[in-house]
Amino acid sequence: MATSGGGRIKTYGRVAVMALAAAALLASASTVQAIAAGPHKPHASVATRSAQQVIPSIFESTLPQYAGAGWSACPTPITWTVDTRDLPPASVDAQISNLTWAFHEWSRVTGLAFAFGGAQELAYDSVNHQLTPADGTITSSRHIYVMFARSSTPGFSGNVDGLASPALVMPSTKEILQGRILLRADYFGSRTSAAGAARAIAVHEIGHALGLAHSASTRDVMYPRVDGQSTMSAVDADSARGLLQPCTG
């Protein structure tokens, strides 16, 4: 989740289990677990880097059975699509460019490949906090759905500007199969020239979709308060690489 105020941006990833029956989105309920957004407490700040050398898994404090889950290191690209319907038309290209840049930054430090799949109309389930194709087609595996949503979207309370987390996990291998990112359209649509702020939020929220929780250091892009910080630290990179799962083909 991301909030802004006084020129500062707070970001929070939120994750909790939803009904197991919803796991049928990609496979039988016995083989895949759907994950829905829920309360996630940011880690407390610490004064020195030595107190935290690894950013924890987003599941560590809420779903410890999935702690350490991550995307597989297979060469097959992780695709991503985006719903931009609620963005002002003049800002669409700029925000897609910012997202493309942010995905490239994570590719650079993790070795994961990302491929833009274009625009896609998405539906948001405000009860289970799931993003799915609006036309009812089956959701994609190895995919991240991104939606620029209205400020009235549940979860965007106050000045919250972003929500993100993994969406589907394979319990047997702890492989993340799907992620979701919601970004507040009015915030991004009104700041088409402020690429630094948009990119900082995008990098942070993608980190949550990749399985990272919050950092306790202001040096990291995964720190819960972001002031245009879009340059990844070695800890950001090492922590993300540490979540990668073996490629089983």
Image (cartoon, rainbow, N blue to C red):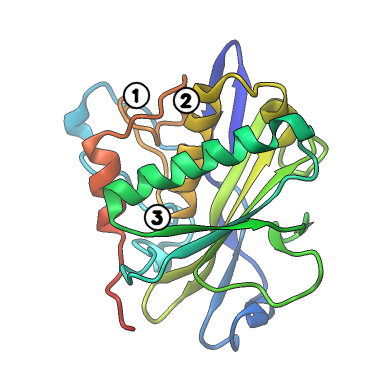
Disc 3 marks a residue whose amino acid type is Glu
x and y, in percent, of residue 142 in the image = 49, 69
Q: Circle 2 sits on which residue? A: 225
x and y, in percent, of residue 219 in the image = 30, 26
Q: Is residue 41 visible?
A: no
Residue at 31% x, 34% y: name it: 232
Residue at 30% x, 76% y: name it: 247
Q: Residues within 10 Å of mark 1 (few under 14, many from 20)?
A: some
**Drawn side of residue 8 relative to residue 101, left or right:** right
Say which quadrant the N terminus sits in. top right
Q: Circle 3 sits on which residue? A: 60
Q: Residues within 10 Å of mark 3 (few under 14, many from 20)?
A: some
Relative to residue 221, is residue 68 depicted above or below? below
Mark 2 and mark 3 in contact (Cβ < 8 Å)?
no
Residue at 79% x, 73% y: name it: 136
In the depicted view, which residue is nearer to us: 1 or 86? 86
Relative to residue 126, is residue 233 depicted above or below? above
Q: Judging from the image, what secondary structure is the residue with disc 2 in?
A: strand
Q: CA distance from mark 3 to mark 2?
A: 20 Å
x and y, in percent, of residue 71 in the image = 39, 65
Q: Earlier in the sequence, mark 3 or mark 2?
A: 3
Q: CA distance from mark 2 to mark 1?
A: 8 Å
Say which quadrant the C terminus sits in. bottom left
Q: For residue 44, which quarter of the picture?
A: top left
Q: For residue 10, which quarter of the picture?
A: top right
Q: CA distance from mark 1 to mark 3?
A: 20 Å
Q: Nearer the viewer, mark 1 or mark 3?
A: 1
Number of on-image labels: 3
Q: Circle 1 sits on which residue? A: 218
